[in-house]
Amino acid sequence: MAEMRAILAELATFRGPQPQLAETIRALRGRMAPLADDARLGTELATTWRLAPPSSRSQNLRPLLENLPLGDELRAALLLSIETDDEQSANAALQVLDASQDESLDDEVLRRIGQVARTERSKLLPDKEAVVWLARRTPPQALASLVLAAFREGPEDAEDRLAATAALGRLDDARVPDWIERLIHSGAAHLECLHAVAQAVASHPASSSCWLPAVRLAVGASGDSQAAIDPWVRWTALDLLCHIESSTALPWLLASWRAAGEDLPSWYLAKVAARAVALAGGARSVEKLLADPAHAALPELAPLVGIRARTASRCPRIARRAMVEWAELHGEATAEAVARAAVERTLVERGQLLGSFLADDATAKAELDASWQPNAQLLLPTERAQLLQEEARWLGP
């Protein structure tokens, strides 16, 4: 093991720039290859991990260990880091486990990471990315933990909440479509909800039809103020609708093209028209399809609102993108910027947003109505209690 110790010592003391580090790691992995079958390799790696400082674990050891088979000793060292070490070490260990060649990790590993995720969920902003790790792996036993993370108290733009929301579609549970519909109706996380639907359709194609109400709800969302969506959300929902049930998607495409909207990017109507024409057999233009009496009864869709209205969206991603576009057109000192800053100051103080690039301590607060209630309140108390019981059966009290 002298060669292995030399390799690890060389890596632990490396202080070069990032491109040089990547080259060094490739070279070291090549030198490690002949040692892969040595039973002592796991012991050396585990010892090196335990003795390394957090910065070395994160910057040097993590990329070396990713995509390597994990022995019992190294896996135990990584789990202990996740449970007891600082967030830099814990998150590096989570990344190594996530990238490992182990196709599946046993229930004990999942349970211990689930326990860390449960502890982190109580924080305003989790330090350790255990929930994000569970969202990527999505083990069936973690359903309750992921739902509770998606509807936890705290910032609605936090990575753990958004990752948990997007992962819900991979879990085969009849309650999930209703929870996703509630989030879509609130207007707070459209793309994450649609990603959950896409995951559900890919994972459980036989039950795709149960997601149609959620997707149609997303297509129909528009209006003004908090309900504002952007063209990308409507197109993503239309694309999903075509994938789930192409036979009924044409009226929604035609209605979306007819409704159009303000400040639309050039690609939007072109994509909608091309998909509608393709579904209709490709022989007629979208204008001729709309003139056909067979398509007289279309869904009633509101036009997509313009950039100005989108600055007031309930969805932080939509509102912030709109604010950037609005500032480029009109400057930052506009009534829209002042209004959005007031909203964000209020949401930050409530703990519903991580922060704001518009608001500061001098910004006035906004009066927000019930439509701005925290997403945590969308989960009924009886549902939360049941999910906590389900989680406890997996993770213990």
Image (tube, grey):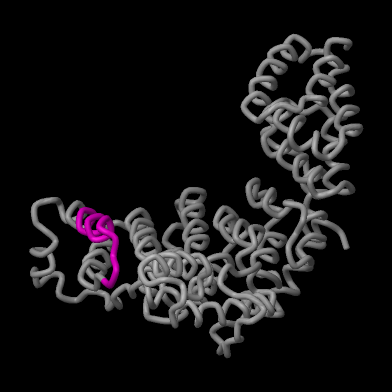
Left or right of residue 317, residue 95 in this image: right
For the point 77% across and 30% down, the residue is: 61
In this rendering, the count of numbered labels is 0
x and y, in percent, of residue 147 in the image: 66, 64
Asked if the magenta segment contains residue 296, the reply would be no
x and y, in percent, of residue 90 in the image: 80, 45
Quadrant of residue 47 in the image?
top right
Q: Is residue 15 above or below residue 111?
A: above
Left or right of residue 94, residue 170 in this image: left
Asked if the magenta segment contains residue 263, the reply would be yes
Could you say which is closer to the camera, residue 43 or residue 300? 43
For the point 53% across and 69% down, the residue is: 316
x and y, in percent, of residue 300 in the image: 27, 78
- Magenta region: which residues? 261-275
Image quadrant in which the N terminus is located: top right
For the point 14% across and 61% down, the residue is: 286
Secondary structure mainly formed by the magenta segment:
helix
Quadrant of residue 234 in the image?
bottom left
Q: Is residue 2 above or below residue 298?
A: above
Image quadrant in which the C terminus is located: bottom right
x and y, in percent, of residue 20 in the image: 65, 23
For the point 75% across and 14% down, the residue is: 32
